[in-house]
Image (cartoon, coloured by chain):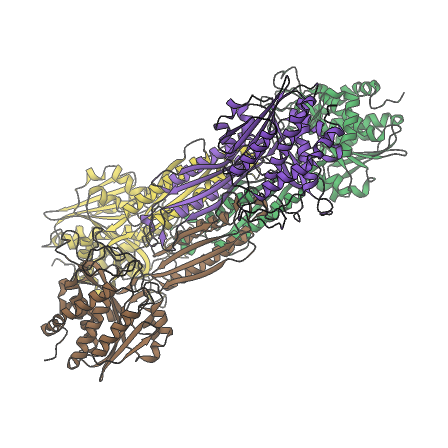
Chain colours: A green, B yellow, C purple, D brown
Amino acid sequence: MPFSISSAALETAVADHLPWLRDLYRHFHRHPELSMAEHATADRIEQELTALGLATQRIAGTGVVAVISNGEGATVLARADIDALPLQEDTGLEYASQKPGVMHACGHDAHAAALLGATRILAEHRDACSGTYIAVFQPGEETAAGARAMVGGGLLDQVPRPDVALSQHVMPTAAGTIGKVAGPVLSAGDSLKITIHGRGAHGSMPHTAVDPVVLASSIVLRLQTIVSREVEPGTFAVVTVGSLTAGAKANIIPDSAELLLNIRTYDLAVREQVIAAIERIVRAECAAAGAPADPQFHYYDQYPLTRNDSGVTDTVTEAFVEHFGPRAVYEASRVTASEDFSLIPDAFGVPYTYWTVGSVDPARYRDAVTRGAVSQEIPANHSPHFAPVEEPTLLTATRAQVVAALAYLGAGREAD
Amino acid sequence: MPFSISSAALETAVADHLPWLRDLYRHFHRHPELSMAEHATADRIEQELTALGLATQRIAGTGVVAVISNGEGATVLARADIDALPLQEDTGLEYASQKPGVMHACGHDAHAAALLGATRILAEHRDACSGTYIAVFQPGEETAAGARAMVGGGLLDQVPRPDVALSQHVMPTAAGTIGKVAGPVLSAGDSLKITIHGRGAHGSMPHTAVDPVVLASSIVLRLQTIVSREVEPGTFAVVTVGSLTAGAKANIIPDSAELLLNIRTYDLAVREQVIAAIERIVRAECAAAGAPADPQFHYYDQYPLTRNDSGVTDTVTEAFVEHFGPRAVYEASRVTASEDFSLIPDAFGVPYTYWTVGSVDPARYRDAVTRGAVSQEIPANHSPHFAPVEEPTLLTATRAQVVAALAYLGAGREAD
Amino acid sequence: MPFSISSAALETAVADHLPWLRDLYRHFHRHPELSMAEHATADRIEQELTALGLATQRIAGTGVVAVISNGEGATVLARADIDALPLQEDTGLEYASQKPGVMHACGHDAHAAALLGATRILAEHRDACSGTYIAVFQPGEETAAGARAMVGGGLLDQVPRPDVALSQHVMPTAAGTIGKVAGPVLSAGDSLKITIHGRGAHGSMPHTAVDPVVLASSIVLRLQTIVSREVEPGTFAVVTVGSLTAGAKANIIPDSAELLLNIRTYDLAVREQVIAAIERIVRAECAAAGAPADPQFHYYDQYPLTRNDSGVTDTVTEAFVEHFGPRAVYEASRVTASEDFSLIPDAFGVPYTYWTVGSVDPARYRDAVTRGAVSQEIPANHSPHFAPVEEPTLLTATRAQVVAALAYLGAGREAD
Amino acid sequence: MPFSISSAALETAVADHLPWLRDLYRHFHRHPELSMAEHATADRIEQELTALGLATQRIAGTGVVAVISNGEGATVLARADIDALPLQEDTGLEYASQKPGVMHACGHDAHAAALLGATRILAEHRDACSGTYIAVFQPGEETAAGARAMVGGGLLDQVPRPDVALSQHVMPTAAGTIGKVAGPVLSAGDSLKITIHGRGAHGSMPHTAVDPVVLASSIVLRLQTIVSREVEPGTFAVVTVGSLTAGAKANIIPDSAELLLNIRTYDLAVREQVIAAIERIVRAECAAAGAPADPQFHYYDQYPLTRNDSGVTDTVTEAFVEHFGPRAVYEASRVTASEDFSLIPDAFGVPYTYWTVGSVDPARYRDAVTRGAVSQEIPANHSPHFAPVEEPTLLTATRAQVVAALAYLGAGREAD
């Protein structure tokens, strides 16, 4: 009997694969690989997909794609990120990282295992659905490089155009729960290196110099006016100068200064406004200083805005509620972190949703964990102590991917 | 016949020692040693002094002192600095530095040779003078450490209190000329490391931070008002922030920032005013930011003001004019560089003068060299190309030390 | 038959009073009076209330209160503001202001007429309701003085404690519609005069001065960091320096400077945070400048936050929808303007709601008026051209006050 | 017997005219007239010159010129300024100003009387000198308008080209003494009104504005860097923002702001550098703010640099020493005040000197007056208490003008 979104059959099907899921997860956790160098990880993913009888493609070196074509119906793209962080693990886990200084501290190991799990369920239960399922294992999320690389590497030509795209992320909320929110969920994040040019001189001869320290300081203060005066009050926008470096000695006026900025917005028009204001201010301040050369702007680590489509979010939420029950699904707050997932659906021009999956044992953190709230007691993503509880995290994440896909591919369903 | 300040006998006595002077100079030049590590240099100086029959003392490790006691009369302290710079020589001289990355690029080799020469002349011609001559070979001028170390190391207890102190410096002006100026001649120079404390946070959460980048920038701009508004217009004062460093990543607000300041003044009251203003502004700006901890001030590389005594300068100038002729002595401009010589007379509480000795071959730099003017064509002190012409530089420097001493010790003279 | 919230009987009862309402409205419009000087206006209000058989009280000079006691039940306080603006009317209306330079350009004339109308309906239809109705005609809203004055003048002692408080405002939206919103609806607005003290001097002698122009400028720039760095991103907060005045002549450094600030917030904790930050920054900047005297802070024109209670807003909205139909009631946006109404319920410690009433003829501004949107074509409040259309504005405003009161006082109802 | 610079005859000749000089002085003092409106003063001067048999010319309305042509020899131009100040006199003098709010508080009454006196002596003693003497009575010094107006009004065409120009000023130093200095003696002073344009808005809507208050503040801080970083340390330069005005209400962001600057320099190249830097900074800061219109620069009250020619100063000083004795002539300090005298010799392209004449009774201010020092006890120029002692001030000023002229026109002398 084919399972449906709500069926106990689905729950059982996933549970049956738990040993395999756990092995996969622990393997990935033990062998983390840095962004865009996930070679062994990608190999293992390909092996697993091949074992399911699926053809795989490598895109952008360490990206892996597999497509399940199952007759008429919608096309769903599900994406998991697979890279790890340059961090020394300090969890004490039996299956802790065996690679010094590299750690799956952001749960991408669970994302990869869960997407393999969902792909396996869908491949093994073709009777339960119809349509096309595209599993995308994406490298390099932590450096904002991977989604861009896969799109640049030909993803759009090598898989069918989806109707909808899905992704998820483990969070330090109660395991077994799912957070969803329509609209902006993750901020756009842009990093920007600004190099400004003065003219060096001995510290006792400022009149022969164009002092880049004074210039840089003036820029930093002037940049404050973007948020305080130019952005509409109450609109989210952050302009942080995280680093300012100029000179090395007290008595030498240096030639240049370097500023590293981070920009966060929830609205692309605001993002454009802020970036234009930054460049306008920096150029003008250089002119005010009589700088001998133009400033240089180098944008990097650019994360897109993640803005969940209302329709897709509603459809998927309804399916989650049907399968997990209403108490397991909560309205998440948007957060100021960033993701590069949305570059993929944006490249296709299709709607998407992105939800969060809890990973904390409520029994262990009884007082700290509430629905959707994150306590400072609990090691969060990017902490050397980050350690999702395997159960029910892996099962929930896998079932969530299946349930969300079935919302579009389930028997008798059509795409929104 | 004892020579006098003006006698050809003195000129001859010095000239006779030229081969020895040149050997000494070339030896020092070939074997430069960094500040406070002038061990071989000090050894050689002691050997030479011992050969003259003088008792020597080592003070502060590499400082050397010898005293010529010659009956009634004034006591004159003459000081030469002996350390080299961390610089790769690029002069092509036959006697270039044999130590990679270390070079006598500031003429201290000539200073040492000339003071040995003057000491030798005075030791060999006791009939020409009466009184006491203290030759001080000082280490560590380039790091402002040596004079302080010799004073701290007991100089005041180990030599008689002088009536007057003398020092000289080679400059890229015409060899054979001497520059003199009464009053402030070299600026006081103070370096200052300021550490300011904010509170770090993720770049997207400035409200949980106290942003030290904004705080540091505000400090830099506010410091400008010291010179622009607080110091009397037309009074020399420089406050340079040579270095500002804070943070390393665009998206992390750092915990602290560090500023390196250099302060230059010609007047100790102005120096005190400027330092008080800096501390007042920095503390208040930290308060404005709500900084969680007080700023820290660490002063270093502190050079005293060099302020030539009018009486001593007049006396010595008169002697120079008598010996070298009026065309060889010019009114020098004060410069913004600094020296630690004055710490020694200031410790004794005695007046001093400090003059400059030309070192450039007028024949070679015919158009570039004028009386007292410094051309950019000519490699200056601290340049890897700095190369004083040996003659007449060594002779002039040696004679200048003898003549200046005789102004106080010469037969029939008394101290001012 | 007693009318109910939804009955046509209520509509008829109000419509029957239209000629009287229009006369009242035009009288008030013709005879506007400035804040806290609404003597004739208050007299006329008292006459009308007395004619209804109600006892009246004068509070704070020009405030008027009347109470309808009608047996068991809830107590509702309804408030209308009655003052005009110092503005020369330019509407061309037949009943335009007869007082040069004074104009009802903010609709308080309509507020007063509508509250008199509602009081008349409730006084004449005691069978339709039970409980206590307190009509409060408040002076001095435009200067934030009136509500404070009535509370200070004994309002709490002279009327029963209400269960709920109500107020409304005409807006340049479509006449016949009502805007409602729960939570913060009008910002808290605080004005602040800061006087900073420097030390004057001739412009050529800055070293004898403490320059208040530089100090004030430094303060203005530093204040920008409150919104850019201290307030949580996305939280509404505005710190505007609307005026900065210092000095009168180019060549005289003045003694002091004056800044006028306006602060807007939707959250009292943010308001406290912003005010504390302003005072911290100003005091510290004065210390940075070495100011000879402490800065002075004078707060004025302080408007409270208007934060509609959710329960009251829901109850009143339900009543509006029942009476006016769902199309007439829309979700309003909160605005950055301010009101002093909430000081009254806050003094009593009771919940309240505040809604808006449209005043623009949709037929005249066909393209400009949409539900809740305000076009720049339409003269808005405080414009010399502001001219609410009398019908249906007056009827709607009067009915709204009755309907909102009946939500609590209607037969068989109880207070929330 | 013709008198010479050193003769007692000259002293007697001047002393004989003391009653007339005092009458003139008191008349001018009683009847002060504001800048460029010195009509009665000019009339009186013309009467006196006519009485001496000299032809007079009026230039620029209230400027008066007379020429004594006396054969071969040099041509000397002597200038006195004649205008008063808008100040209420508070000296209690018998001959105090009879015009409320107008006062000769800067000694121009003495200047005018002394120049008339010198002209009379030279006219009456043609045998004592040969050459040409041009007496220039200049209006409007206090507003920097008069010298410019006379040059613009044809002065160069209406008098012979002088070889040298002379002027003097009474100062609150000991009466009977004369201060002289070669080189820069009075600073160049330029006032500058800068209007910057933003875009106004309600204080709660900064995003629709370009905030001129923030812009102006940024400009003020940035202007500090001209003196702190751009001008050579130790070089005199002052940039004062004496006035900053923007806005009138706390809750309205104004459209524009106005800054009044005063610039003081002793070197025209520095003046040009400072002015260029100000314009560069203001323009760039407006660009940084996104200002909708260019800033406007209006220069006014522009005083030239007064730089005494060394040769002329030496010649005149020698004559002063010869006549008054060495104790009466001292080396003055340059001051930061300004004068427009130099515009006249600069227009002719001839050298000049400008000296000061003491005006304080040493007996009265025994402890306060020293050679050249100015005590704060003594009412200075521009004080409502400024009251030169008539004797010997008038005699000294008159003799100084004669002696300085004779240095060039005296029998047997030639121009430098």
Say whether residue C399 is left or right of residue D317: right
User: For the point 85% across and 23% down, which residue is it?
Assistant: A4
**Is residue B384 shown to the viewer in this render?**
no
Say whether residue C211 is left or right of residue D5: right
**Is residue C194 shown to the viewer in this render?**
yes
Say whether residue D258 is left or right of residue C293: right
Question: Foreground residue, D309 or D393?
Answer: D393
Q: How many marks?
A: 0
Return the x and y of residue B297 as percentages of the image width and height: 38, 37
Question: Foreground residue, D174 or C243?
Answer: C243
**Quick check: A369 above or below A278?**
above
User: For the point 70% across and 39% down, which residue is it?
Assistant: C392
User: For the point 64% across and 34% down, which residue is it?
Assistant: C114
**Quick check: A396 above or below A46?**
above
Question: Foreground residue, C175 or D275?
Answer: C175
Say whether residue D150 is left or right of residue C16: left
Return the x and y of residue C356 as percentages of the image width and height: 65, 36
Return the x and y of residue D203 as percentages of the image width and height: 54, 43
**Quick check: C2 above or below A344?**
above
Most distant residue in the bottom direction: D71
Q: Quadrant of the C terminus of chain C?
A: top right
Q: Quadrant of the N terminus of chain C?
A: top right
Return the x and y of residue D9 as percentages of the image width and height: 10, 74
Question: Quarter of the image holding residue C165?
Answer: top right
